[in-house]
Image (cartoon, rainbow, N blue to C red):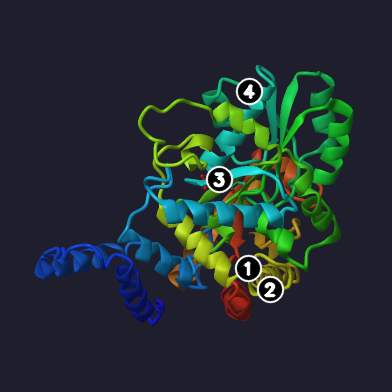
Amino acid sequence: MTLETQSLTILYDALERLEQGFKDLPAHDVDVDMDGLRTVMLEVAEKMHDNYPYHHPMYAGQMLKPPHSIARLAYMLSMWINPNNHALDGGRASSAMEKEAVVGIAKMFGWEAHLGHLCGGGTIANMEALWVSGKLNPGKKIVASEQAHYTHNRLSAVLNLPFQTIACDARARMDLNALEDALKKGDVGTVVATMGTTAAGAVDPLSDILDLQAKYNFRLHADAAYGGYFVLAGNLDADTRLALDRIGEADSIVVDPHKHGLQPYGCGCVLFKDPTVGKFYKHDSPYTYFSSAELHLGEISLECSRAGASAVALWATMRMFPLKRGGQFAQDLENGRKAAISLFEKIQGDSRFLTALRPELDIIIWAPLAGKASEISHRAKEIFESAARENLHLAVASFPKATFESAWDIEWDQEQVACLRSCLMKAEHLDWVERIGGILMP
Ligand SMILES: Cc1ncc(COP(=O)(O)O)c(C=O)c1O
């Protein structure tokens, strides 16, 4: 068995408890066509075979991590209610759970006061942060590193704000000289610092960017969609630690519970340090908010209907795994990083491979040794395919020449090189490093 199913028995108990809350209602039985359900469900299960095994430690490719059983159960339980966190009328309990969970995330970054909410994911969360930035600095540029998620460029276009890419250094982090050159022009409204890049898990030098903020006065947005939870990890290198320790000094933060927060997809979070930015969300809905003078989450979010189930799942997960340093949740992140360092060091010690970027979080990048960038790229794809035949699932990512030019003595016959990439996001990956290494380095 590779899928966890034993926890399902608890769902029945929880459903019974849920039912008790509605016992005053007249009986209302829903007829279900059990044969039809069974036929279709088994067909669905067959169809779902056409997936990489994301839930298994031998899946060590893209940023994909299964939700924890508690998140899955809480999400399923709430499906019998299907709350909508747009307004309290649609989900009182789940709205309260969302507020509590978001307070917990804000506290993780050291914020007592804040404005924030859950949303569909990192893209919409970043869009809200950039939208508020644009309101505060109309017409001014958004800048982000060339390793920032491509969504920032595209979202700036959606928001009709100018966008500029800032070059990266040899650690795949935002280059401070390139940033200062852009700032000197005086037209930058917002700097996006990526706290864990999508490709390499590189963490932009937030502490130095804050020093530049004191000089050039821009709004600082931390895209910590991937790396935000690593503030809790106790085994980071000093410069990564320094950057993450100062994240609370940013003006807005995005973190994705559906990446490292053990949640199913559909759970991002945006936080603003200054709660008064809530004024930009103001609207007069003639039909939504009539049941309570208390805050409805739809009053402070761009999305209207939202899955209350996401909030229920996140609340339950944070109840079971509080966001505290040294706790189980933090230790699991630490294990992912340990696994990444351990596999990286094995590959580094093997003359058949090229490495350069020491993992800052839990993502590793490496490439097969060859004389030219084109050959490396070709062989990286071959390894990706041959590993998959042995049930080890990796990913491939392209990097610009500038990332490896100083570290690798190769012929640059093309401007980009495709490397192998592995996100060791599961705590269990630590126990699988030997086996994974054995397949990669027979
Ligand atoms: C740093 C970063 N920002 C934003 C996003 C976009 O998030 P989502 O895919 O949840 O919309 C990602 C996704 O990988 C990311 O890694």
Instruction: Residue 190: name its quadrant.
Output: top right
User: Which of the marked residues, 3 or 1, is nearer the chain's N terminus?
Assistant: 3
User: Which of the marked residues, 4 or 1, is nearer the chain's N terminus?
Assistant: 4
Q: Position of residue 182 (x, y in %)?
A: 79, 25
**Which secondary structure, mark 4?**
helix
Q: Which mark is residue 117?
A: 3
Give the Cα separation between the discs numbered 2 and 4. 39 Å
**Which secondary structure, mark 1?**
loop
Does the residue at mark 1 contact the one at mark 2 (Cβ under 8 Å)?
A: yes
**Which secondary structure, mark 3?**
strand
User: Which of the marked residues, 4 or 3, is nearer the chain's N terminus?
Assistant: 3
Does the residue at mark 4 contact the one at mark 1 (Cβ under 8 Å)?
A: no
Q: Position of residue 164 (x, y in %)?
A: 68, 26
Decide: few, some or many residues near mark 3? Use Cα within 10 Å; few <14, some 14-19, many ≥20: many
Q: Does any atom of ligand 1 lie closer than 8 Å to the CB of label 2? A: no
Give the Cα separation between the discs numbered 2 and 3. 24 Å
Q: Nearer the viewer, mark 1 or mark 2?
A: 1
Q: Which residue is mark 4?
A: 135
Q: Which mark is residue 322?
A: 1
The correct choice, above or below, for 328 with respect to 231 in the image is below
Q: Could you tell whether 308 is left or right of 156 in the image?
A: left
Give the Cα separation between the discs numbered 3 and 1. 18 Å
Q: Which residue is mark 2?
A: 327
Q: Position of residue 301 (x, y in %)?
A: 51, 37
Q: Amino acid at mark 3?
A: His
Foreground pick, 185 / 271? 271
Q: Amino acid at mark 1?
A: Pro
**Which secondary structure, mark 2?**
loop
